[in-house]
Image: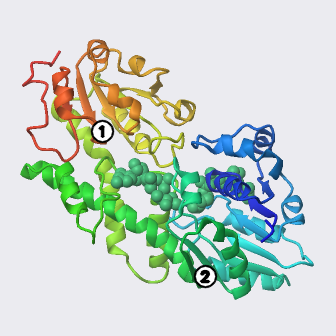
Amino acid sequence: MPAEPIGVLGAGWVGLATAAGFADLGHRVTVRDVVPERVTALSAGEVPIHEPGLAELLERHRERLRFTLELDEALESAGIVFVCVGTPSTYSGDADLSAVWQVIDELAGCEERLVLVMKSTVPVGAGERVRRRLDDRGLENVGYVSNPEFLAEGTALANFRNPDRVVVGSFAEADGDRVEALYAPLGSPILRTDVASAEMIKLASNAALATRISFINEIANVCELVGADIEEVARGVGLDRRVGPHFLRAGIGYGGSCFPKDASALKQLAANSGYHFQLLASVIEVNELQKRRVVQKLRGQLGSLRGKTVALLGLSFKPHTNDMRESPSLVLAPRLLAEGAIVRAWDPVAGEEARQLLIGVEVAATLLEAVEGADAALIVTEWPELRKLPCSDVRDAMRTPLIVDGRNLLDPAAVRAAGFAYEAIGRPSAVVARLDEAGLRS
Ligand code: UDX
Ligand code: UDX
């Protein structure tokens, strides 16, 4: 099949990964964004997000890629256009679809049939409403397909190339066929379905993963009370093929641009439809409480945090990205400041974002600078660089050598041997090294 030209609307994480992925499959791709600086930067080969391999892939396929502010340019040669604009949460928890409607209302009539492919996460029923809006505007010649993305940040390109499944929900079979054909070279399972079910597959998939995380975090909290070790428990539970090992990593809660937003959008969608989604309400509440539990651990070791210096290590919502959207660090920093603590912070790539977002926090340029004179180092994001944290330089730089491991990244025995007190998530007291026991309190 000749590689048909493609349009992509929205040059964010999903839009750029999608554009790079299809360019890599041989398609000419025109990417449209509404932010002039973003379009200028991308046209100059500068990629405004930190996503492993993305800049290289966009560079490799420069001649197949075009970045523009003009919707017409993205539509002029493309029969298929992916919508990847932001659909952030509103205060009510509903998804804000204003960017989607803006695109729909900008569309003009076209000779050739155009297929709009929704990749942005939208509430169930949005496709139906878009269809009605297009028909009301006499744009019957514009098809609509729901093709939710399952890209995870940090592995977006690998997820594009090797998806567990590609979901294609369409009103018109032929439109679905055209989108299915685009993904055929990947050789992955393609699930053809109706638009509403495709929309729900996306929300339910993220809700299912978020539920696993809140579940394992609650198990971890019980482990602490009964002397079990969550790392052992998660391994044992995950060996059950009906459960599987993925997304059973206990920690200080999930963040990011998707799970929090999609969980609240699904809960709100259910409520709007007259159903109280109890389980999801608990998943969301457990996650908010989990972000704050480490503050009690700090108090348990240091007593009052007033005047204590705490170093937050890792600020992005997960490793290998500079994305701080809904990152636990955004909750922890003001929580600690409210306790009267002095808060320092460090992240290998999200320093710039952090300086804008973490008010009252000193964002250090280096890890050692962040822990200088600190009473505690709190691992918030499991960056691989932090595996080196329990070393003599850090111990000597800190006022009180205490590590609270919010991601169970470190080996407790190695931390203790390096002369640190240690707290983690869901680990038995034998693993915990208390300051006063180890005679480490300054
Ligand atoms: C987006 C959606 O927000 C999310 O719901 C979905 O799951 C995946 O796609 P992401 O790519 O992470 O997520 O969004 P973001 O990084 O915010 O990028 C959106 C881009 O769309 C931005 O570059 C923004 O400038 C652009 N945009 C926004 C438009 O081009 N047009 C608009 O009208 C609004
Ligand atoms: C997620 C989904 O994985 C992806 O399929 C979807 O398209 C978008 O949302 P992303 O938000 O990039 O991707 O990150 P993910 O790797 O899923 O992690 C989400 C959050 O859950 C992170 O804060 C991470 O730290 C946390 N997490 C993940 C856990 O706390 N424990 C786990 O076992 C896994």
Label 1 amino acid? Leu
Q: Pick the residue in front: 129 or 232.
A: 232
Tell me: 233 left or right of 15: left
Mark 2–mark 1 distance (CA, rounded to whole Å): 41 Å
Q: Position of residue 160 (x, y in %)?
A: 59, 59
Q: Position of residue 253 (x, y in %)?
A: 35, 51
In the picture of the structure, the residue carrying the numbered disc 2 is: 195
Specify the quadrant of the image occupied by residue 124.
bottom right
Quarter of the figure with the C terminus: top left
Q: Pick the residue in front: 300 or 55.
A: 55
Count residues near mark 1 (Cα–Cα under 10 Å), then give few for <14, some for 14-19, many for 20+: some
For residue 203, above or below residue 89: below
Identity of the residue drawn at 33% across and 30% down? 387
Asked whether disc 2 touches disc 1, contact meaning CB atoms under 8 Å apart, the reply is no
Q: Secondary structure at mark 2?
A: helix
Q: Which mark is residue 107?
A: none
Q: Secondary structure at mark 1?
A: loop
Residue found at the far right of this picture:
111
